[in-house]
Image (cartoon, rainbow, N blue to C red):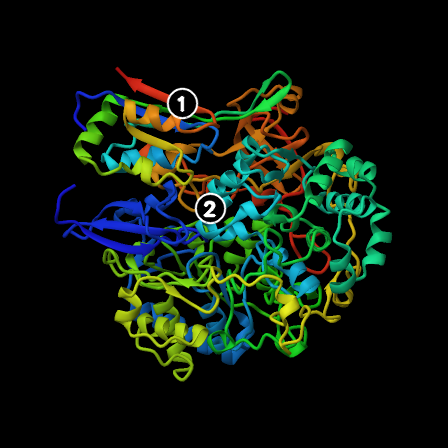
Amino acid sequence: MSEDLKMTRTVCMGCHDRCGALVYSNDENKIVKITGDPDHPFSRGAFCGSGMSQRFIHEDKDRVIYPLRRVGERGSGKWERISWDEAMETIINKTKELQEKYGPESIVVGQGTSRTINDWHCRINHTIGTHGWGLAPLHVCLNPLILPNALTMGVPQMSGGDVLYRSDANPEESNTIVLWGVSAMGIIQQIKYIRKAQEKGTKIISIEPRLNDLAMFADLHIRPRPGTDGALALAFMYIIIKEELYDKEWIEKWTYGFEELKERVEKYSPERASEISGVPVEQIYTAARMMGNTPTAVWPMLGPNCMHSNAIQNGRALACLQGLLGPIDQPGGFLISPKTGPHFDQSVTLWDMGMDMLAPESKVIGADEYPAFAQLGGGQWPHGVFRAVLTEKPWPVKMFVFVASDPLMCYEDPHTIAAALQSPNLELTVVKDFYITPTAKYADIILPTESWAECEIMDEEMGCGVIMPTARAVDPPGECKNDWEFLLSWGKALNPEQWPWEDSREMLLWRIKQMHGLELTWDEYANGGLISTEFDVRNRVYLKHEKGLLRADGQPGFETQTGLFEFYCQAMTAFGYDALPDYTEPAETPYSTPSVAKDYPLVFDSGHRLYSFFHSAWTNIPQQRSLYPNPFAVIHPEDAKERGIVDGDWIEIISPRGTIKAKAEVSLEALKGVVFVPRPGWKHECDELGLPGYDWDGAGPNVLVPAEPCDPSYGSSPMRSTLCQVRKEGAK
Amino acid sequence: MGNTEKTAMLVRVDYCIGCQSCQIACQEQNNLDIEEKWLEAVRRKPKMVEGQVRMSHAIHQELDMCAKCLARLDGVQPMCVTNCSLDCLFVGPADLLLKKMQENSTGKWQLTILL
């Protein structure tokens, strides 16, 4: 390596993990290489292949690097370069016109994930005159995982696993760790610490229909039929209660509704749960007894309680199981973090989280049909938003701005989305992204975006209470701007008092001050190394409910209606859910819809994540694509044989909603009767490898997924549990 | 380390999850064209062994090229090693890696040596 390279210490924002990165660049503004930062407190030098793709993206000739305006018909694929001023003038004028003519609710701002705009997105919504998250896939992502914990124990966090803290975790405190619906890709930084704990005696249970890479080392791997996790959790509780594997003092003193729970789980004997889930009875007993050897840390990810039509009650069953394995917040158990993940300060978001999102004047689409999502999820029900473009009901939606979001790839029923994006009712669509995505093809304006090595913005996602400064390693190409600067110039034009800053640096320092009470200069931020906040997870305080650290009033207990951990949760009933955890069969399965299953006998699960891609991104990046060149589906050898399919055949996967293609990967990795289709969808072609792209409708799993029926009050769509059939391409 | 010493790669196979970060790291480290691979992480399907499912992935390397890479880096650890999220891949002189492997009492290890 030559000596004149510049090394920049920053943070990768390619996914939620926020790993430390060292970016080496030369005097021609090129990235020469990227390595993990060995001094980063959590990632300690580890760095995945996907993060390294930043070098390619920085200089990719196909990247959008200037604002573009559509020429000709929508979807014609013809664009002309315009200036930022022209682009912003169009956006600002249209915003003001629509606010006046149709009301602010006719303007919908959509966001995807991991580009640090969570709270600024809420702020721009407020400036426009709308509320909360606007449009985001929170009905299927993360929030259904958080909500049951929020209601059950007043803790809005996704899991209690101490392992979240990566190198600062102490998973060896747990006798048992349950990885539930997690793939190795989602916890790539944590696995080595879990493995080390395992070598010291911690037992690992993995629960996931597919034999993912965690099955390699799990002491027990359980494979339920997708969407039946709730029944399984209830059966675990049945055994734990029958065999008195719980802490009686904790149950008596700190929980509410134990007797009712006890009665409820009578319905879910291991035999019954076995019939429902397909998991052998003996395995259910083994797992429950392993969990009963507390402290046990249960780490659910999106598998059990997101992306199912019974998502929320599955989640409640898991939350109650964790309570039964209490005390909550004991070392090695469900640890309540001071604050992790996206967290909000109202002075930043301007969103009054106590507001009634269901009131007619709040104008939240989906509030009538899926009130739990509107009120507790804080967002508009996505399908309802796209439908509103076409029907103008409950009111017209006239303008979309999508930042880091490709709706045609990330939401259920994309056929409706495609129709909406092409509808003459829609007056302006703006997409801010790195590449011309399937959604951007239908946009009127595309805005260029800085990627993580090119910008200085940051958030605390998975920062575990530590602020990890970001720095610009290389200048962005062309006229790329970061998302905050875009929102700033839009917001300032609409309401300068709410957007008083000059640039994203000022926004960043102000945000840190609001959220953490730290007044920093730019130099102190950029050059001071890692900044510990009051939420630093390394300052562990256990059993916070005993110390009055969880409730707003400072009293001992939990921030719930009863002040206790609620097995019986009255708050659930306001949204039509049973106050006790219960299992309902997903809406479309061989058992709930046998008539559909006649033609579509296989369960379809698109929860499969791949290391090299993030959601639908990076199928155009040669190094990433070379690892997974073709869209594929994992199918069990017996299911393949019955259909005359051999490994590597091109197949069609069909549901009542549509058809996609994939290469068959015939493997024991699949559970018999289930087809696993990875999430990415392979939307982009990869010129360097001569591999085609499949747009949104060729290989995207959501083509097969209906918007309804979905979770009864949260609107979660069944991306991981619906029905399909497969056949060899061209076969009848 | 010079070219004359025996170069080896040590992998803790039961830690490797097949994320293929090392494969990309190798290409990035050595500025390789996309078709050229000195290190390949091959994801393998689960298989049945005496009625039980077993899973492991495979690392394949061109050790003469590893030797060149190490010589060029002159003491700096290559990115295939430093970036590994599982800390389960090591490259270096065979005797040192053999010793490193023998310090462990558990695990499934694979040591590949170029004599």
Front tag of 2 and 1: 1
Which residue occupies the foreground of this view, A170 or A660? A170
Q: In the rendering, at what x and y percent does residue A305 appear?
A: 65, 50
Tell me which chain the residue with mark 2 is part of: A
Which of the 4 image quarters holds residue A501? Answer: bottom left
Image quarter hosting the C terminus of chain A = top right
Image point (38%, 50%), residue name = A77
Question: Which one is in front, A726 or B34?
Answer: B34
* Secondary element at image label 1: strand
Residue located at (59% from left, 21% from top) = A645
Amino acid at pointer 1: Gln
For residue A68, which quarter of the picture? bottom left
What chain does badge 1 belong to?
B
Task: Please give left or right for residue A120 compared with residue A410 in the image.
Answer: left
- Crowding at dot 2, Cα within 10 Å, few <14 / some 14-19 / many 20+, comes out as many
Are there few (<14), some (14-19), or many (20+) residues within 10 Å of tag 1? some
**Could you say which disc has been placed on residue A607 in the image?**
none
Q: In this view, does A629 lie to the left or right of A369?
A: left
Q: Considering depth in this image, is A120 or A368 the residue closer to the camera?
A: A120
Q: Residue at x 32, y 74 (%)?
A: A520
Image quarter of residue A608: top right
Residue A605, percent across and down? 62, 39
Query: Which residue in the structure is indicated by mark 1?
Result: B110
Which residue position is annotated with label 2?
Answer: A616
Give the CA distance from mark 2 to mark 1: 35 Å
